[in-house]
Image (spheres, helix red, strand yellow):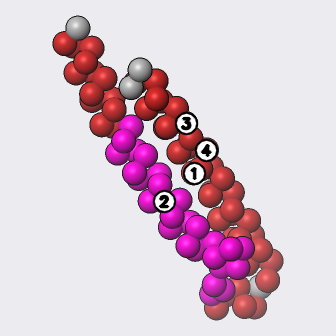
Amino acid sequence: SNTQRTRDSDARGIFEAELRKAESRLAALTKEYNNGAPERNALELRNPQQYMDRTAEIKANMARTASDIESIRRELGRINR
């Protein structure tokens, strides 16, 4: 029906916007992660543990964002059927 097509179109638009946002976030996190060697700030030069914690946090955020991207793509696949 027309109503369902309209809802699907709206949902697709929302998911596509969320996908672009998540992909942008992943790109930013990947750049910040710098292959496991993010740039150190002044506080981290004096406190190596803080640097390791931040590096681990960035890596975890990257994994979470990649998982979000996969989920959004699955949902888009369901809508497009």
- Sequence-wise first label, 1 or 2: 2
**Circle 2 crowding by C-alpha within 10 Å: few under 14, some 14–19, many from 20:** some
- Residue under pointer 4: 67
On screen, residue 2 versus residue 30, left or right, reads left
* The quadrant where residue 48 appears: bottom right
Distance CA(mark 1)–CA(mark 3): 10 Å
Distance CA(mark 1)–CA(mark 2): 7 Å
Q: Secondary structure at mark 3?
A: helix
Q: Magenta stretch: residue 38 in it?
A: yes
- Residue under pointer 1: 65
- Residue under pointer 3: 71
Instruction: State the count of labels.
Output: 4
Q: Secondary structure at mark 4?
A: helix
Marks 3 & 4, CB-CB < 8 Å contact: yes
Q: Magenta stretch: residue 78 in it?
A: no
Q: Nearer the viewer, residue 41 or 31?
A: 31
Q: Please report the bounds of the magenta region as a residue range.
A: 15-41
- Sequence-wise first label, 3 or 2: 2
Disc ID at residue 25? 2
Q: Quadrant of the N terminus?
A: top left
